[in-house]
Image (spheres, rainbow, N blue to C red):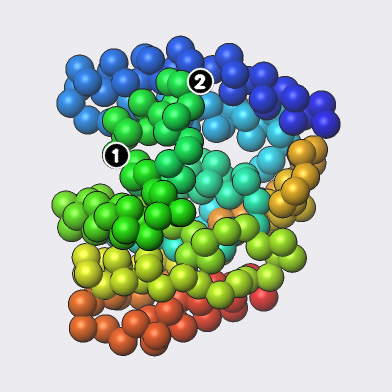
Amino acid sequence: MLRAVLVLLLLSLFIPPATIAGVLAAWIVGRPRPIYWLGRLCIHLGLKLAGARVSVSGLEHLGDGRNALLMANHVSLLDPCVLLEAIPVDFKVLVKQELFKVPFLGTAMLRAGLVPVDRKNRERARASIARAVESLKAGNSFLVFPEGTRSKTGELGEMKKGVFIAAMEAGSRIVPVAVRGTRTLLPKGHFSIRPGNVTVELLPPVPAAPDSDREQVMAEVRGRIASALA
C-alpha cells in the first residue's frame, strides 16, 4: 500500500509542471519528443518507487520503428508504463477519451499525437481508427492491446478485429510483444503494488498488407504471443 501511495504522490507532483514544460518545449522544437522524454522520466521514477525491475529483449525486431504496430498482452495497469520504459520508440496510443479531460495530462497527450477513442460510440471509434491508420501511414508507430481490456486471469484472451484491420489498411509491420510479471505486481482490481521483475519480449514481426488474410494474421500474432507467454 505504501508503494502505491508514494507512486500516486509522485504523479500528482510531477505531472502538472512536467506537462506544461513538455508542451511548451514541444511547441518550441516543433515535435513531441520533449513530452515523451519527460513521460519516460516520470515512469522510470515511478517504477523505481514501485520496486519494478524491467528487462527487455528482441528490440532488433523493431527495425526502424516506422509504421510499426506493437501488439501486447494486457493484464495490468502497469503494462503501458512498462512498455514505455522498455521500448525506445515514441509510439502513439489509442486512449479512452475520458483521460483527455484530465487537466494538463490531456493537453500533453494531444500534443504528443495520442488518439482519443470513444468506446461507447461505434462511429467515433471508427473515426479514431481511421486517424490511427493515417498516422501509421505517415511513419508513426502505435502500441495497442488487441484483447481490448485487461485479462482477469492472466490468460491471453481473444483479440479484437479492429486493430488488425487498421494494420492491414496501413500496410504495417505488426510486432507481437509478450509482457510477463506485471500481473503479480499489480493485478486487475487491486491497488497495492508489489515489487518484482517484469520482462518484455519483442517477437518476430508479422507483415499486414492490405490483401493479407485477416484471420491468418490474427492467428499468427496471437500464436506468437501465446507461445512466448507459455
Q: As drawn, is 91 to the left or to the right of 64?
A: right
Residue visible at 20% across and 17% down in the picture: 28
Residue type at numbered disc 1: Gly
Residue 116 seen in the current view: yes
Residue visible at 55% across and 41% down in the picture: 81
Residue visible at 37% across and 27% down in the picture: 108
- Note whether 30 is above or below 61 in the view shown: above
User: Where residue 30 sits: x, y (%)?
Assistant: 18, 26
- Note whether 104 is above or below 89 in the view shown: above
Which structural element holds mark 2?
helix
Residue visible at 59% across and 23% down in the picture: 11
In which quarter of the view is residue 122 placed? bottom left
Q: As drawn, is 36 to the left or to the right of 7?
A: left
N-term mark: 1 or 2: 2
Residue type at numbered disc 2: Ile
* Residue under numbered circle 1: 113
Most foreground residue, 123 or 155:
123
- Note whether 219 is above or below 72 in the view shown: below
* Residue under numbered circle 2: 15
Which structural element holds mark 1?
loop
The N terminus lies in quadrant: top right
User: Where residue 104 sits: x, y (%)?
Assistant: 43, 20
Residue 173 seen in the current view: no
User: Where residue 141 sits: x, y (%)?
Assistant: 31, 53
Most foreground residue, 123 or 170:
123
Tell me whether the residue at label 1 lies in contact with that at label 2, contact meaning CB atoms closer than 8 angstroms.
no
Q: Residues within 10 Å of mark 2 (few under 14, many from 20)?
A: some
User: Where residue 18 sits: x, y (%)?
Assistant: 44, 17
Mark pair 1, 2: CA separation: 18 Å
The C terminus lies in quadrant: bottom right
